[in-house]
Image: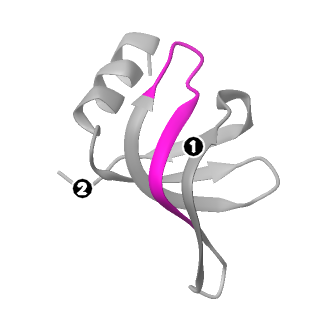
């Protein structure tokens, strides 16, 4: 996927819940509030999702782009 396509997908996901997988295996879900050219993400109402399905509330969060492995946009 080109950078332009990734940015376009993030723009359409603004204000919606996205799922993010991080290096180390952590999974975070939250409302996408913003992003920059480095793919740093600002999330609101973020929560860490454990493998057993339980979640831990994190609140407002900035996720550094170089720690992100995958961003899953909301279903269309």
Q: Find out whether residue 50 is within the magenta segment.
A: no
* Residue found 82% across the figure and 54% down from its top: 24
Magenta residues?
35-47
Q: Is residue 45 above or below residue 6?
A: below
* Residue found 60% across the figure and 40% down from its top: 62
Instruction: Check disc 1 and report its element: helix, strand or loop.
Output: strand
3 displayed left or right of 68: left
Identify the mark at residue 70; answer none if there is no mark. 1
Q: Residue furthest front?
A: 60
41 displayed left or right of 56: left
State the CA–CA distance, disc 1 to disc 2: 15 Å
Q: Is residue 11 above or below residue 21?
A: above
Image quadrant containing the N terminus: top left
Chain-order first, disc 1 or disc 2: 1
Image quarter of residue 10: top left
Residues packed near mark 1 inside 10 Å, few (<14), some (14 to 19) or many (20 plus): few
* Residue found 44% across the figure and 57% down from its top: 30
Q: In this view, does 20 lie above or below 64?
A: below
Question: Main SS type for the magenta part?
Answer: strand
Image position, residue 76 (x, y; %): 17, 51
Image position, residue 75 (x, y; %): 24, 55
Q: Find out whether residue 40 is within the magenta segment.
A: yes
Q: Nearer the viewer, residue 7 or 35?
A: 35
36 displayed left or right of 64: left
Instruction: Check disc 2 and report its element: helix, strand or loop.
Output: loop
* Residue found 58% across the figure and 59% down from its top: 28
Identify the mark at residue 75; answer none if there is no mark. 2
């Amino acid at each position: 996927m080109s950078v332009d396509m990734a940015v376009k997908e993030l723009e359409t996901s603004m204000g919606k819940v996205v799922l993010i997988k991080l290096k180390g295996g952590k999974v975070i879900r939250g409302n996408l509030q913003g992003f920059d050219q480095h793919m740093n993400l600002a999330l609101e109402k973020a929560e860490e999702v454990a493998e057993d399905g339980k979640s831990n509330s994190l609140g407002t969060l900035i996720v550094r782009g170089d720690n992100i492995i995958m961003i899953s946009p909301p279903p269309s």
